Image (cartoon, rainbow, N blue to C red):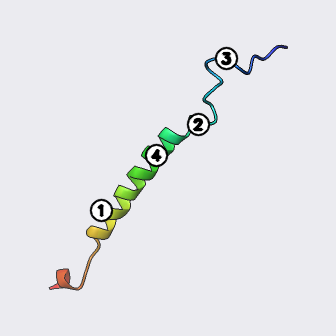
Amino acid sequence: LYFKSKDIYNEGWQKAWIIPAFWQVLSYSLLCIICALWAPSQNSMR
């Protein structure tokens, strides 16, 4: 069994998670901000 570890497809596997993780963190942050803005407050209970 031969594994070529220095080809074009295996060079960036250590950094490949950064872009998908960025979008996950961004969407979670936006969800938290929206939830905080839409949370009930004392003024809305009139």
26 versus 20 height, above or below: below
Return the x and y of residue 42 as percentages of the image width and height.
Answer: 23, 85
Label 4 or label 3, whichever comes before in sequence order: 3
**Distance between mark 4 and mark 3 Cα atoms:** 26 Å
Q: Which amino acid does label 4 sit on?
A: Phe
Tag 3–tag 1 contact (CB < 8 Å): no
Residue situated furthest top in the rendering: 2
Which mark is first along the chain, 4 or 1?
A: 4
* Among numbered discs 2 and 3, the one appearing first in the sequence: 3
Q: Mark 1 points at which residue?
A: 34
Is residue 45 found left or right of 18 in the rendered image?
A: left
Residue in the image at 53% along x and 41% along y:
18
Q: How far apart are marks 1 and 2 (CA)?
A: 30 Å
Quadrant placement of the N terminus? top right
- CA separation in Å, label 1 and label 4: 18 Å
| Residue at left offset 70%, top offset 20% | 6
The amino acid type found where label 2 is placed reads Lys
Res 7 label: 3
Q: Which residue is drawn at 58% across and 37% down?
A: 15
Q: Nearer the viewer, mark 2 or mark 4?
A: 2
